[in-house]
């Protein structure tokens, strides 16, 4: 099982890297509202996604924010962003709802945040492409890769933020 998970993660990382390399350069004036507020370069966004994928399998721990000690969902986001950008986002999921800029699902790119819940969000993850996100789901679990279109997550209210 672990071997198959690592192989899947390696394949997804390769696709993300190739997708970033194959992107057409933006022309001046072509930025959409969802693209404008980003403080991350395309390279940083890809690095965030790859780093998050590399943490799949790390144990969940409420309040956790390191690979050694485990992660909760916002601890995972903080650890990855701090490692890749030098600047951590807010620590709680509730605070993440005002971090960066909102965007529609159709504008998601790697490194964006996925928040779940009505009103004040109660869970969050990092978007890694292909309608998938990495998150630390719950006690007794591990950091994992899930699909926004999966049976559980597709029924949840999701919002998206671009840091």
Image (tube, rainbow, N blue to C red):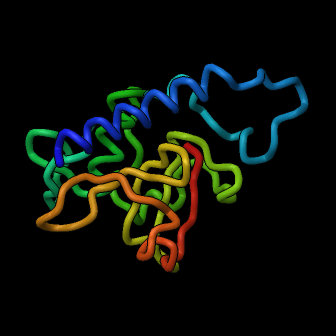
Residue 41 locus on image (x, y percent): 59, 25
Q: Residue furthest right?
A: 29
Q: Is 5 left, or right, of 51 in this rendering?
A: left
Residue 105 pos. (x, y %): 65, 58
| Residue 130 placement, left or right of 102 | left
Q: Residue at x 15, y 67 (%)?
A: 139
Q: Is residue 152 left or right of residue 104?
A: left
Q: Residue at x 74, y 38 (%)?
A: 36
Is 78 in front, or is 147?
A: 147
Instruction: Give the image location of residue 10, x and y in percent.
Output: 35, 31
Looking at the rendered structure, the number of numbered marks drawn on it comes to: 0
In the image shown, does 30 or 90 lie closer to the viewer?
30
Q: Position of residue 121 (x, y in %)?
A: 44, 71
Q: Is residue 82 above or below residue 130?
A: above
Q: Is residue 41 above or below residue 54?
A: above
The one nearer the camera, 91 or 7, is 7
Q: Residue at x 64, y 56 (%)?
A: 102
Q: Is residue 129 left or right of residue 90?
A: right
Q: Quadrant of the C terminus?
A: top right
- Which image quarter: residue 106? bottom right
For residue 39, above or below residue 126? above
């Amino acid at each position: 099982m672990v071997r198959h998970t690592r192989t899947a993660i390696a394949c997804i990382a390769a696709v993300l890297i190739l997708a970033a390399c194959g992107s057409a350069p933006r022309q001046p004036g072509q930025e959409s509202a969802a693209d404008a507020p980003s403080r991350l370069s395309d390279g940083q966004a890809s690095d965030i996604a790859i780093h998050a994928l590399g943490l799949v399998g790390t144990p969940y721990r409420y309040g956790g924010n390191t690979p050694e000690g485990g992660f909760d969902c916002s601890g995972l986001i903080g650890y990855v962003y701090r490692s890749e950008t030098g600047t951590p986002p807010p620590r709680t999921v509730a605070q993440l709802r005002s971090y960066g800029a909102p965007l529609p699902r159709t504008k998601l790119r790697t490194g964006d945040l996925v928040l779940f819940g009505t009103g004040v969000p109660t869970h969050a993850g990092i978007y890694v492409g292909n309608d998938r996100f990495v998150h630390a789901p719950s006690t007794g679990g591990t950091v994992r890769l899930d699909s926004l279109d999966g049976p559980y997550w597709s029924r949840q209210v999701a919002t998206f933020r671009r840091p």
